[in-house]
Amino acid sequence: MFMYLFSVWCIRALSAHFVTAERDQEFNLNGKWMLTNSNGSLSFPAEVPGCVHSALLKQGYIQDPYFRFNDVSYRWISLDNWTYTATFTTSAQMRVRKMVLLVFEGVDTVSLISLNGIVVGKTDNMFRRYQFPVRDMLKDGENMLQVSLQSPVLYASEQNKAHSAYRVPPDCPPAVQKGECHVNFIRKEQSSFSWDWGPSFPTMGLWKGVHVKGFDVLQLINVSAVPFYNATLSQWSVQVELLVNALEETHGQVTLSIPDLATEQAFHAWFLQGQTKNTYTLHINTSRHVKLWWPSGHGEQASYVLSVKVILDQPFNINADTKVYFRTVDLIQEPITGSPGLSFYFRVNGKPVFLKGSNWIPAHAFQDMVNPAVLRNLLQSAVDANMNALRVWGGGVYEQDLFYSICDELGIMIWQDFMFACAMYPTETDFIQTIREEVIQQVRRLKSHPSIVVWSGNNENEAALATDWFDIPVFQKPTYVKDYVTLYVNNIKALVQEEDESRPFLVSSPTNGAESEQEGWVATNPYDPHYGDVHFYSYTLDCWNWTTFPRTRFASEYGFQSWPSFSTLEKVSIAEDWSYISNFTSHRQHHESGNHQMLQQAALHFHLPNSSEPLKQYTDTLYITQVMQAQCVKTQTEFYRRSQSEILQGKGHTMGALYWQLNDIWQAPSWSSIEFGGKWKMLHYFTQDFFDPVLPVAFEENGSVLIYAVSDLSKDLKLRAVVSVYAWSSLDSVCTVKSDLTLVPGGSALAIFNKPVSALLSGCGGCTRLTCLLVFHLEDSSNYQQGPVNHHFLSSPKKAEGIQRPNISAKFQQDRTGYTVVLQTDSIALFVWLDVAAVPGRFSSNGFLMISPNRTLNFYPWAPTTVEELSRALTVISLIDVY
């Protein structure tokens, strides 16, 4: 997101259970610490893992940081220095271990660490795991551990000043973001200094766990296991890597087994002194059928258990179990008949897969607030909307282990960015070195997950350099290109490919892929639709006009803003804020002219709300922005899905649509389809349909209406289009037209209906573009509906004639299967929206066109509720209700 042919075989390693004969000692330091600011005026208990902001909130020193203007009011927090202090005692058994390590899984960000008054180490990278030897510093009785954190804002400023040779842009974010400067000089979450969808909360803290680890022989740091497939031998193998820390050279045996595949092998183990990576290849028994991991919608997510046993010559052993998922992925970039450029698509287990999904940003400004329930809800919501892919965007964080484990389980493919976004970066030795360790650690941690299908070096930095976002003088550009290649190619790419040969690597997104490499890694036009992936945004062009969208090989970012619902905003605002022209509304919008752009786009096709009652005017405006967003992203996504099988004027074969963005970091306007807190916007309900495995898509060209059948299925279908013409003034269709059955191959998009609009309307009793609309679906040879019902407007709703004001009634009911709501209407209703305020849950459908007198929906609660609570909370509106 902007501010301004090779095979892959993969598995997933879970947190393993290690049993050691020497009974390694481990002491957990998570829990209560003390937290103090620089002058000692504040000192209070703080939870670890955690951060300063959440600790201040818990102790009552600050209000909800998301409330009203608190992001600016609490700027002082990140401008101060803070110290975490813990006291602990260790056992005699711990102190006699030959090696005792103090381990920090994650420190945010720049710190000096001391134990009993002795400095043990420093940190400068939020994305690294640090460990320090402390055996000789431990005392009988009480030990004091201190982590002194430096203001990230002041540190970034100092690093920028120290880089005096030339500027490393951008200096500061746009003023509308109310953010901090020089975030590219510190290795922490880039969006924590602000973004165009989020606040500025430069966090500090111990954001992951802390523990003390003691051992005498060997420490097992990490296990990874990545399968490979030998097509010649028709055999799988699993490459297992043990990252160990041995106090002295030692020998023994490593046994690897997958019982369910009747596979076991023993290897001589030779561990050198120090930290080493030891690799073993387990060949899978060819007499056993290996079940594969598939993306959601394409098959099951089969898994196996891999057991690792280490027995050394001296009395010492390790047992570790980990889950294994087998799958292949290829990124195909090859010439296309009838088109310049190269293809760009992913092939999973030999099958081309259209990536349907969105982009993931941090789920909260404070990572300790992102609990398992939040992750599960958001990722399940993605799958429930027929998504099979998410891009973990490069301005946030490498997500926690549970995130990737849930994606493995649900079949969500992950496009994984490294954490660099919308900036140039310094390439001094110290900076490069910490990045190298960051990359190595993250790849080793994550490469066993089958969900990760591609690594990407950064977000939009090739485009920023190629198209001169930062006004770099022409004579200086070679310096920046050199830095770019040094960081992303000579270091990150080289390290990733050394650590993980099993999946593709892209230097940037967007990129021309192989073509960018040919052009020296920075293409003249990284947005070229003939290559790679494209990011595209336009807020002034008519989003209902599909010809304004680039027919790209892969659309990895696109979208439109909307506001969240009133129930979401109400929690962080007061009555005087509930106006589209309030200071609060302006403050929350971090995208230049964003509030105006939403209404400008909505006004192209809808009358804007005009209620004389202020609160209704406000809530109606929130609603109309969601209608606009849903219809805009629907139009663009359907264009990409129907373009997958065609080359027109040298463009097409689109094989991915990842709209910007899935989730929100706070309660504010953004491009998201899910509000902060998990509530589905209208867009997310639309996503269920436009990402359906079988989809009818209609559009107009040269005076004709065409309907494409899009299928993600593996099997072929014979399908016909069934088109019903409705007058706006009646619930009874004027006429229905069916096309002939057409064979639609699996994994394709094919035109199955083509008729001049004038001819279609002339056969429908006096219909005109202004008085009628089209509703259509697909049927198979057995007359069963395949996929959702879709709609096509023949004119803008604001120009439509004959629309009635519907009387809609709704009644909640409960039976043994759950909650339902029965709707009745006396006329066609557009964008019918059911809202149960703050009651957590979702409907089976929402934001729909109601063209029948009755409709029954399911409601899926996310917490205990009752019919009475739902009935009290329920409101129902449609488009005409806001006029």
Image: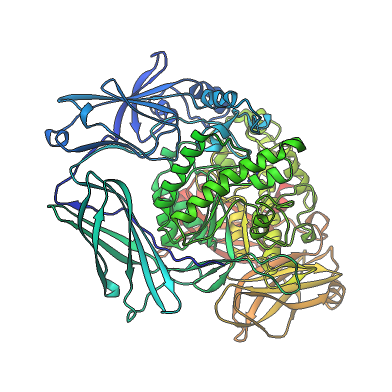
Residue 869, percent from left and from top? 46, 48
Position in image of residue 676 (x %, y %): 53, 43
The reply to whether residue 865 is visible in this rendering is: no
Residue 205, how many percent across, how many down?
Answer: 41, 31
Does 36 appear above or below 840? above
Q: Residue at x 86, y 70 (%)?
A: 703
Instruction: Please say if 464 is above or below 605.
Output: above
Left or right side of 600 for 691: left
* Count of numbered tags: 0
Which of the two residues, 506 or 759, is positioned nearer the viewer here?
506
Left-right relation of 688 to 539: left
User: Taking 242 as reference, is 541 left or right?
Assistant: right
Q: Where is 644 relative to 454, above or below?
A: below
Q: Residue at x 87, y 73 (%)?
A: 758
Q: Quadrant of residue 367?
A: top left
Q: Is residue 809 left or right of residue 798?
A: left
Q: Quadrant of residue 690?
A: bottom right
Residue 487, compared with residue 630, is above or below; it is above
The quarter of the displayed image where residue 255 is located: bottom left
